[in-house]
């Protein structure tokens, strides 16, 4: 299992297209920050407001890329046969994938967050950066990161069920963009019982956690519990699905 | 090395593999021969744990711990590799997966399969290059046992000859055991020491190369200008009585295919003109088709 972990780290650090993509994202960040600076649009609230917008986009722009790199490549390039064929236990495969996703997305979130903050501090040097704002940005970042983890594990279960990347990616995107929640909310008008369940959806839980932080500066522990349950259940589903499934060529 | 006992894989009511009991011994070059859809790849997938058997058992290297045993097996199936990595990096990934950290081993394999100077990413590889890389990956770390599914697909004649020499060299030098499936039966016939013929999921016959040789070589055929005298010479001089004469006045000598010089010398020294002398043999394809009672592509 440790050999596979090492080989995965090695592979991901040799995927040049990922790095080009992240450099492009950083470039877009810096351009937008410079634009605000040139237009003299900075106000004391700019840091928090712009960070909120950018954090909300991270699951789509970063989560998707990390999901494809970690889970998608094996199927797209028909490597699953080779990896499992070396005698790697299927549980070890799933475990390494999950750990790699957790680490990889955390690193990318952190780097992009740091780049944004540093760029902002340089471009908007005349504005004070309050510790309170940075704390809020960090909390929102953590909430979004955990939300991305939960959705990735749900989509991964789907991926191992059908052993196809595209349907899993579509599911990941529809979950992350709130499309699934939107559909359930509409259905709740007809079947009110659905609302009881949507209150415990990942998106609702993360929304509540954000609201609670902004209004009361309190971290919602039920969010952590809820997300942990989602991740554990999704991972358990992956094990159940993948345990006896034929690996498609 | 590999033993299957009544190995079965069923999809609904369809048996892809049906009660296959096969045995691959150490040092064998085992050729698995069958038509498209006969069950060859399914057997390989079962051996490598990619699909779960519906029944029967597998033992590798005298071990029931298949996952551990698979670590020491080189395996090639399909030509999938990471499209954005080059040959070296793809091999490095596979090597790390096997716990091999030696850069020298990667270079040795690249040299072995003729991809030493390739810097292109896998997505731009030709079919032959993909196949070479797949073979190379299976040989990483000098495994005791190598399983190759259609390894010569897409290789040019030189590539096929190189592959054949490589297999024979590894087999002779390191006693590496090979389990190979191929459509090119002539190729398998040149290197195989043991064969398994599979049809519609059943293992129809398991046979050694020697037995196969005896089965497909059906004797020596010769024709001379004086048939009667030739028969007298066979009986009186060479003491051969188990010959037969065809309508075309050809003489068939079963079991004499490796001694044509004795017959030729005897006939010529006794003043007969030798019109023809040949070994009567059926091809491996014909043998296989006779065995399964079909005539479709192999």
Image (cartoon, coloured by chain):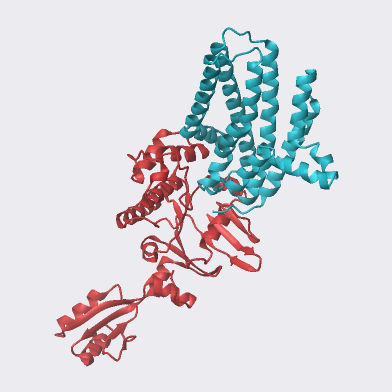
Q: Can you say which quadrant of the picture contains the C terminus of chain A?
A: bottom right
| Nearer the observer, B110 or B223 | B110
B160 horizontally vs A100: left or right: left
Quarter of the image where one finds residue B191: bottom left
Q: Residue at x 73, y 34 (%)?
A: A203
| Nearer the observer, B1 or B97 | B97
Residue A62 % position (x, y): 58, 32
Q: Which chain is red?
A: B
Q: Residue at x 40, y 51 (%)?
A: B131
Q: Which chain is cyan?
A: A
B76 horizontally vs A136: left or right: left
Q: Can you say which quadrant of the picture contains the N terminus of chain A?
A: top right
Residue A12 % position (x, y): 52, 33
Asked if residue A89 can be seen in this view, the reply is: no
Residue B61 % position (x, y): 55, 51
Q: Residue at x 77, y 41 (%)?
A: A185
Asked if residue A75 can be seen in this view, the reply is: yes
Quarter of the image where one finds residue B193: bottom left
User: Quick check: A15 above or below B215?
Assistant: above
User: Quick check: B226 above or below B82?
Assistant: below
User: Quick check: B144 above or below B189?
Assistant: above
- Tally the numbered discs: 0
């Amino acid at each position: 299992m440790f050999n596979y972990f090492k080989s995965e780290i090695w592979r991901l650090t040799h995927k040049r297209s990922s790095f080009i993509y992240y450099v492009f994202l950083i470039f877009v960040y810096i351009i937008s920050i410079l634009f605000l600076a040139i237009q003299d649009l900075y106000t004391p609230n700019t840091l928090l407001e712009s960070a909120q917008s950018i954090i909300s986009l991270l699951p789509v722009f970063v989560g998707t890329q990390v999901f494809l790199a970690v889970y998608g490549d094996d199927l797209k390039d028909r490597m699953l046969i080779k990896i499992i064929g070396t005698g790697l236990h299927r549980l070890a495969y799933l475990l390494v994938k999950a750990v790699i996703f957790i680490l990889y997305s955390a690193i990318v979130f952190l780097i992009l967050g740091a780049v944004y903050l540093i760029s902002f501090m340089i471009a908007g040097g005349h504005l004070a950066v309050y510790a309170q704002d940075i704390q809020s940005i960090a909390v929102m970042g953590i909430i979004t990161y955990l939300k991305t983890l939960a959705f990735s594990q749900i989509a991964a279960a789907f991926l191992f069920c059908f052993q196809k990347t595209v349907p899993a990616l579509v599911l990941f995107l529809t979950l992350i963009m709130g499309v699934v929640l939107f559909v359930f909310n509409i259905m709740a008008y007809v079947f009110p019982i659905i609302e009881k369940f949507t209150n415990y959806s990942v998106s609702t839980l993360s929304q509540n956690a954000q609201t609670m932080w902004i209004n009361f500066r309190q971290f919602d522990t039920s969010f952590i519990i809820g997300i942990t349950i989602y991740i554990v259940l999704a991972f358990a589903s992956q094990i159940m699905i993948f345990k006896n499934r034929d690996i498609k060529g | 090395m590999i033993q299957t006992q009544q190995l079965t894989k069923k999809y609904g009511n369809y048996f892809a593999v049906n009660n296959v009991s096969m045995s691959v011994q150490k040092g064998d070059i085992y050729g698995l021969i069958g038509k498209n859809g006969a069950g060859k790849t399914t057997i390989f997938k079962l051996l490598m744990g990619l699909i779960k058997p519906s029944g029967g058992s597998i033992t590798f290297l005298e071990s029931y711990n298949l996952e551990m045993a698979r670590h020491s097996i080189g395996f090639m199936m399909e030509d999938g590799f990471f499209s954005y990595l080059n040959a070296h990096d793809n091999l490095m990934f596979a090597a790390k997966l096997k716990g091999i950290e030696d850069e020298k081993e990667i270079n040795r394999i690249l040299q072995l399969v003729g991809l030493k100077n390739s810097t292109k990413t896998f997505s731009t590889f030709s079919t032959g290059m993909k196949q070479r890389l797949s073979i190379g990956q299976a040989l990483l770390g000098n495994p005791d046992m190598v399983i190759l599914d259609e390894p010569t697909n897409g290789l040019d004649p030189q590539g096929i000859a190189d592959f054949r020499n490589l297999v024979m060299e590894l087999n002779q030098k390191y006693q590496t055991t090979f389990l190979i499936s191929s459509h090119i039966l002539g190729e398998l016939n040149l290197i195989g020491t043991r064969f398994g013929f599979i049809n519609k999921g059943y293992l129809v016959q398991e046979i050694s190369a020697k037995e196969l040789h005896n089965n497909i070589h059906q004797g020596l055929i010769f024709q001379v200008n004086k048939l009667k005298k030739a028969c007298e010479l066979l009986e009186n001089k060479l003491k051969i009585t188990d010959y037969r004469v065809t309508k075309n006045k050809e003489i068939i000598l079963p079991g004499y295919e490796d001694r044509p010089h004795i017959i030729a010398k005897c006939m010529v020294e006794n003043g007969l003109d030798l019109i023809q002398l040949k070994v009567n043999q059926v091809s491996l394809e014909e043998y296989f088709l006779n065995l399964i009672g079909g005539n479709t592509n192999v």
